[in-house]
Amino acid sequence: MKLTFWGAAQQVTGSMHLLEVGHYKILIDCGLDYEKETYQEENQQSPFDPSSINLVILTHAHIDHSGNLPTLVRLGFEGQVLCTSPTADLTSILLFDSVELFLRKQSRKPRTKRGNFSGPKPLYLHKHVMDTIDRFVTIAFNKPFKINGDISLTFIPVGHLLGAAAAVLTINDDGEKKTIAFTGDIGRENYPVLVNPEPLPEVDYLVSEATYGGRLHTKDQTLEERLVKEITEACIKTPGRLIIPAFSIGRTQSLVFALNQIFTKKLLPPIQIFVDSPMAIQATDVYRKHHNLVNQEAKDFYKTMGDEFEFEHLAYVQTMKESKDVSNYFDPCIIISSAGMLEGGRIQDHLYYNIQNYYCTILFIGYCAKGTLGYKLLSGAPIVRIKDREMMVYATIRQTDLLSGHGDHNDLVKTVKQTGQPKKVFLVHGEEKSLQYLANALQEDGFNVVAPERGAVFEI
């Protein structure tokens, strides 16, 4: 049995791991690697022959785990993609949105003399997304699924995102039973809307994410307290606006539910809230469709107060005209818009009109990869480029980890310890410092740990 790491190796994005059992090849995740500004070009080529892959296992929908599936299909992959039902629904939304983002980037550059767009060529088109969706086969949580006579798969809920799962494979490798688990992205306990991560079984090998290695989430303040504080500072004490970049899928739904609870309790006076993201509207419908998979808190709220994602003074923005009207709304307000790293979507319009506004606060609630506009703002850049224009940063930039969908250092260590004493623990999906911190902590506890480089091959 052979394991090769083709993505999220000593970096965060681009999750992609190749497991070979004899001649049978399984790809676990196929995400976009967007660590570089030239990420579209970087993702054009596959490091292996896509037609040789028999099966893909998709842990969850986020684009750094799912976003290059249509490229795989375009280049010759003909197998199935196994995932949970919510993951299939959410991934479909994200992949179609990716096509629109590619096309917009291509059309921004001047046309050539022949009239063609000179921007980066799209990684894939709508046809490739539809071909990919046709390959989805959904399986339930905690029910072993027999892939073939030698391999079975079980999905374990891990929070992080609706439908997110750790993939646990039980394998007959030439008469020897072996188990290997891929955590995908591990969530955290008591997160709005999402269930707590379930314990993983004991395994022989573990591939674990390390995003928050060496970092602990804020403990001295609740999410409710922090949101009340930020809204008070940005919208009440000073009548301004609070802009919250949020991923349309996952983060927005949890944030809206948290705000619903705050205003239902009357902890703040009414303030207009805009969710400016058509994709978030689609994703919220998926959360409603799979309401049986949300946590008990959300279910109880629904029974007593109604829809977690609808309340007075909350408006979902659909059209571009409505979005422009939000920019012209001059009373104090909260604007939730995507994308969370500011690399596209309507959030760029709101930044364009507000980055030089002293009465605007931009609150980041998630991770921003190196090279992204969000990362530059969080790093304190005094000037940023938005829509081909250099702009001074006068808005207040704030950040909180209380809505991070990832478990912190202690959560990651806890997850690894649940799996017994694996023969080897592979750490992926983390920056160098995070990988090192987590590796050191696990090694002190007696674990055999490695943080593989891209292309590293292991016989297991």
Image (cartoon, rainbow, N blue to C red):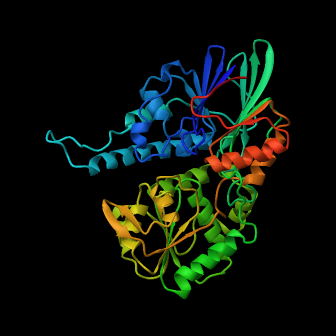
Q: Where on the picture, by quarter, is residue 391? A: bottom left
The residue shown at (71%, 61%) is 217
With respect to residue 208, does 326 lie above or below?
below
Give the camera-side residue of 247 and 317: 247
Q: Is residue 75 left or right of residue 183?
A: left
Residue depicted at x 26% and y 49%:
109
Q: Quadrant of residue 76?
A: top left
Residue depicted at 45% across the width and 75% down the height: 395
| Residue 252, position as x, y percentages in the image | 56, 60
Which residue is nearer to you in this view: 426 or 132? 426
Relative to 359, is 197 above or below? above
Quadrant location of the N terminus in the rendered image: top right
Can you say which quadrant of the picture contains the C terminus? Answer: top right
Question: Looking at this rendering, what residue extends furthest in the top direction?
Answer: 174
How far across and how far down the image is residue 288, in percent? 60, 54
Of 395 and 321, nearer the camera is: 395
Task: Report whether residue 230 is seen.
Answer: yes
How many circles with numbers are drawn on the protein?
A: 0
Q: Could you tell me which residue is drawn at 64 percent across and 34 percent down?
A: 452
Percent position (x, y) of residue 369? 53, 52
Looking at this rendering, what residue extends furthest in the bottom direction?
237
**From the viewer's perspective, is 440 left or right of 15?**
right
**Position of residue 223 in the picture relative to residue 343 (left or right):** right
Left or right of residue 179, residue 111 in this image = left
Where is residue 392? Give x, y as percent.
38, 71
In the image, residue 444 sits, relative to residue 403, either above or below, namely above
The answer to whether residue 198 is visible is no
